[in-house]
Image (cartoon, rainbow, N blue to C red):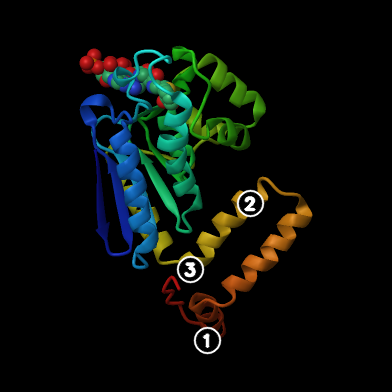
Amino acid sequence: TITLKTNDAVATITLNRPDKLNAFTPLMHQELVDALTIIEGDSHVRAVVLTGNGRAFCSGQDLTAVQTGESIDYQALLKEGYNPIIEKLTGLEKPIVTAVNGVAAGAGVSLALACDLKVASDKASFVQAFVHVGLVPDSGSTWFLPRQVGLAKAMELAMLGERISADEALRVGLINRVVPHETVLDEATALATRLAELPTRAIGLTKRAFYQGMVSTLSEALDNEAELQARASQTYDHHEGISAFLEKRKPQFRGK
Ligand code: LHQ
């Protein structure tokens, strides 16, 4: 249900159920977590691209698999199926770029929101579809949305469930870039390749610092920064960055 390909320092995960608009199944949950675990343990991988095969990015939960809320334990489905993916994406100390190649709906939007940089095709669209099936936003959407677009817009997107274009998503701050449809994977891969050449340990720690900072006081954030900076200071790339600056040459970062 997914593919994982690694090319030099960039790993690409592709959701691969195009006939179902890449809707989630329990197998896909497991395969995504497994792929992210492999990426986590592979020190050669320094950046990740996440995209979808076919005309959609991800249509959220496969609705053909859920008839009614009575027969399936939704709490367990979220805690065991969806939440570990979101925790893995946000906890991975490597930058993740998503190439939103088409429509993202429901938990498919949450999936994109849990990535660090979001590049969307000009044909992509975003819909907080949960309300249309009588559900609350899940898989992190209640956390990400108000933080990324502000509470007023988050309420509107979630309560009305209107499908918004990539341009509108860019305007409200949901994504980073909109590119011509045919180029979306290339653009995201180029961005991931660029990130992979940067000090990716520091970038991973930056990601950690931001996520911790979102739920901490300023004093806690300051303490946390000091702790993470101590770790960053131990990296090869920090020393390389300083040396290159003083020697007036281009740094050669290694991601360690
Ligand atoms: C689908 C799906 C789909 C199956 C399109 N499943 N077949 C939920 C439940 C429980 C616990 C945990 O959490 C969750 C989280 C969630 O994600 S809830 C939200 C689930 N997702 C949705 O409600 C989105 C449903 N889909 C749509 O609204 C539309 O299909 C979108 C906006 C994604 C795309 O619209 P169109 O581009 O007009 O395509 P379409 O509607 O014609 O769909 C094409 C086919 O894909 C169609 O099948 P068919 O056999 O007629 O060609 C759809 O039935 C199928 N499909 N999404 N999620």
Residue at point 40% right, 36% down? 81
Q: Residue 81 carries which label?
A: none
Left of 228 or right of it: where is 36? Answer: left
Looking at the rendered structure, which numbered label has been put on residue 212? 2
Query: How far apart are labels 2 and 1 at the CA level?
Result: 35 Å
> Earlier along the polypeptide chain: callout 1 or callout 3?
3
Circle 1: residue type? Glu
Label 2: element kind: helix
9 to 173, vertically: above or below: below
Q: Is mark 1 on a helix, strand or loop?
A: loop
Q: Which mark is residue 247?
A: 1
Q: In which quarter of the image is ligand 1?
A: top left
Residue under circle 3?
Answer: 199
The amino acid pointed to by label 2 is Gln
Provide residue 169's location: percent of width, then percent of height: 49, 31
- Tell whether 59 sits left or right of 169: left
